[in-house]
Image: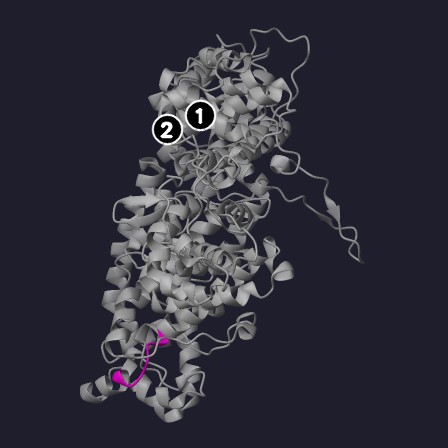
Amino acid sequence: MPPKKASASDPEERVSPAVGGSPGAAAVGRNDHKYTDFILLCQSLMVEENVIERAWRIWESVSTFLDEAFAPDVIRKHWGICIFIASVDLDTVSFTLTELQKKLDMSLADFLQSLKRVDVNVDTVSTKVNSVVEKLETKYFVFSVLYNKFERTCEKIFEEAPQNKDSSEINSKSMLKICWITFLLAAGKALQMEDNLVLSFQLLLCVLEHFIKFSPPSMLKEPYKTAVSSLNSITPSRPLRRSQSKAIQAIVSPDVDPKVVEILCKENECNVDEVKNIYIRTFLPFMDTIKISASNAIPELEEVSRKYEALYLRNKDFDGRLFLEHDKTLEADQEEGSGAERTPKKIDNKDSHLIVPPQTPVRTAMSTIQQLKMILNSANDKPSDTLVKYFNNCTVNPTSDILERVKNLGEEFQRQFAQAVGKGWADIGFERYRLGVRLYYRVMESMLKSEEERLSVQNFSKLLNNDAFHISLLSCAVEVVMTTYGTTWKRGIQQETCLSFPWILSVFDIKAYEFYKIIESFIKAEQNLTRDMIKHLERCEHRIMESLAWQSGSPLFDVLRQQKEQEEQPEQPEPTINLNQPLQHSHTAADLYLSPIRSPRKRGSNSVHANPVQGAEIEAASSGQLHPLAQAQLQKSQKSTSLSLFYKKVYRLAYLRLNTLCNKLHLLTEYPQLEPVIWTLFQHALQNEYDLMRDRHLDQIMMCSMYAICKVKNYFQLLFKTIVTAYKDLPNTNQETFKKVLIREGQSDSIIGFYNVVFMQTLKTNILQYASPRVNYHTYFIIYTETPR
């Protein structure tokens, strides 16, 4: 049953030399010229001895799977990647990423792709390195997108510099360099999360506004030239020199100029008030910290470059100044395009004279924000008259509690937003929250109107006095706003930042299982959500079902325990033929938060509301109008609707994931009889051994179920390495899922370690039921200690 012990003929499942083992073991083969060349590369990067040892062991592991015919330069590139992995793992990085790229003659895009290919074993690249690489990849994508946007924007702002200009003059070429490097410095010092496209772009507009304002009008194109001319009472008759600039700069206010910023924001579809706020609250304080004031507003290029150099050497990532030189190290992957402007499209119909602007990541982000603001233009950040009527109809009026809750959560949101982004960004966080509050009241009103039509009642006292309902609804509304402002799309995949879901759950201290109850009703209630936003909320629901709802302390385990204590039958799985179909039900958020709802006596009914008498009883209970004893009896006779619906959704997601993975491994065509057996074991674990899911991931149980059944059926040898390789290609997967699995409190291991120590021990009896008669059971239940760690 457990993965076999490593052998010379079976390298796939052996222990990776990258982790564990003695230094002496790595000395094998070191007398050849390759090791000498490897040492020379390490010395050129000033790598310490412990990193050299680790990097060489990683190389020995990786080289087993590489083509021996690789050219020396390709081998050298792999050495560099191994050195990078070892350095990050040991927190001993002695070089910048750009320095390493220069040594290896690799672009950043090629480097990142090659690093992923090097991850040949379950544990070649640790979760720590994965995390660093993911952040680096997102930052690189954001900055390459912004630089493309910066170049196009500057072409519309600055006149081209004449070829015969005196080098001592400030011309458009040098101004571009100063602008971009100042932005790099501002992003690194004033913005704690440089991977946020919208915030970074708004900061870039602040930098441009500042330098446009202090540029001589002769350097500018219209309409910026006119806007700046009206600011300056002195216009020099000859080109502005660095020594002459102070006289003009001294009379220009350092505050944001409404004319310039309005033009910039209009050209780039950006909110003027937000950019002004960032300029005053964040950009000007940053300029003070680097000692650039109104009297010296255009710094020396060398000065600002020197300040950025110090930041770059400290961060040890890529040198953003090289974008200005179109350096090879920062060349974009041709498949990604890095947000480069594409040819505008013409509509092929009767309106063919219309030109559709090309979509870039920045334009897409700005357009999405505008769509959200249009939806919320008519909304208010206070309850509407309609909502007030609903509140007044309640047995216990919830108005004061709702307003107090909104106020308190707003203060907490603003505090944590500033903590994550930077203290100068607190007001921007509050504006995001205010938009979320508008959406919260708007969706609440829509939900209550639907409930009134459905139940013909207006007293929703119990629902509107339910804390979990309100916090979940507000969290979902704010999540929509945060995603609208914070999402960067790359190849159609949403890039995550530290403000991405589930960040909002920790801010509002709401459990994922409670949050899941609102998602579907929220989507139905707000019909103007974009398709991408609906997909995002559905993905949030999937993440809750995969892992977040199964974390220690989740109310899900309380509900499961209560069900077990009451000796109720767990939710029975539907036939697999039904699991491929969309789930049909008529439950609403009110049903789930007030959760009684499905009576065992009405098994043929999808919803309690199919029974008018029962529906009236429940609505009476929800409004607080039912006698306490009658209410207790009603709830006792009913199963938890929220749990029942949750498990139905979990089964559908689990079966879809399993079916997709089986397809990737060609099991559906070559061994079609295996999938139903794997599903039976998988479903049994979820239904009867749900503690296996505590602080773990649905896909971990899926992969172990697949390995176990394939092992005991003995049709063919399926290695965990093969499963993991196919799993990586599934959508929305994370390598930490198979590299770091909880074994017991405080201890984690790879998926193989989890299978041996936990999964197999828990389900041994069940697994044996499916064993082929020719299998030696005893052999398969020997646990080997030599598994990846």
User: Label 1: which residue?
Assistant: 57
Determine whether the residue tagged by mark 1 lies in a helix, strand or loop: helix
Compared to residue 634, the image places residue 467 above or below, namely above
Return the mark for residue 21: 2
- Amino acid type at circle 1 is Arg
Q: Would residue 167 appear left or right of 487 to someone viewing this image?
A: right
* Cα distance between the residues tagged 2 and 1: 9 Å
Would you say residue 299 is visible in this rendering?
Answer: no
Return the mark for residue 81: none
> Residue at (54%, 30%) from the top-left corner?
64
- In terms of image quadrants, where is residue 614? bottom left
Mark 2 against mark 1, which lies toward the viewer?
Answer: 2
Residue 515 at x, y percent in the picture: 36, 62
Q: Name the quarter where the N terminus is drawn.
A: bottom left
Return the residue nearer the eye: 531 or 156.
Answer: 531
Q: Farthest left residue?
A: 629
Q: Residues within 10 Å of mark 2 (few under 14, many from 20)?
A: few
Q: Give the range drawn in magenta.
A: 636-642
> Residue at (59%, 53%) from the top-left corner?
665
Determine whether the residue tagged by mark 2 lies in a helix, strand or loop: loop
Q: Name the quarter where the C terminus is drawn.
A: top left
Residue 3 at x, y percent in the picture: 44, 47
Would you say residue 124 is visible in this rendering?
Answer: yes
Q: Would residue 201 appear left or right of 629 to someone viewing this image?
A: right
Q: Are circles 2 and 1 on residues that touch, CB within 8 Å?
A: yes
> Residue at (47%, 13%) from the top-left corner?
39
The stretch drawn in magenta includes residue 640: yes
